[in-house]
Amino acid sequence: MEKRIGVVGIVVKDLDNASTVNKILHTFAHIIVGRMGIPYKEKNISIISLIVDGTSDEISSMTGKLGKIDGITVKVAITKK
């Protein structure tokens, strides 16, 4: 399957679930090219942006697992084939 480049935005509204997010990201470390995390203390949230390079299935698997966590919002934009 062809690899694609993508940008993943993650908003962590429930900071108690941050460790679960990090465990999933660690599992998919092989497709993560870069990561930036910003704590937004005034709003009591954290925002994580990722650059990924993987197959559509890998990216979808990661974002699907993240999206199932309570208090987590995930959006992705990937290159076309």
Image: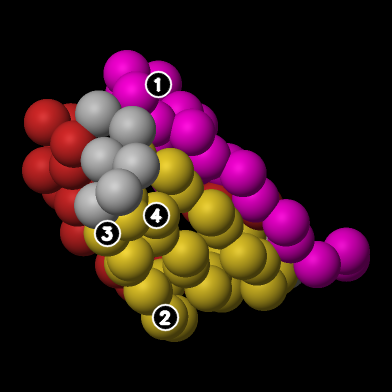
Image side of residue 49 versus residue 1, left or right: left
> Which residue does the numbered mark 4 point to in the structure image?
47
Secondary structure of the residue carrying tag 4 is strand
For marks 2 and 3, the one nearer the N-term is 2
Asked where in the image residue 45 lies, by quadrant, the reply is top left
Indicate which disc residue 39 carries: 3
What amino acid does circle 3 point to? Pro
Q: Residues within 10 Å of mark 1 (few under 14, many from 20)?
A: few
Mark 3 and mark 1: Cα distance apart in space: 21 Å
The residue under label 1 is 68
Answer yes or no: is residue 3 visible. no
Judged from the image, the secondary structure of the residue bearing numbered disc 3 is strand
The residue range painted magenta reads 60-81
* Relative image position of residue 19 (x, y in whole percent): 11, 43
Residue 78 falls in which quadrant of the image? Answer: bottom right
Residue receiving disc 2: 34
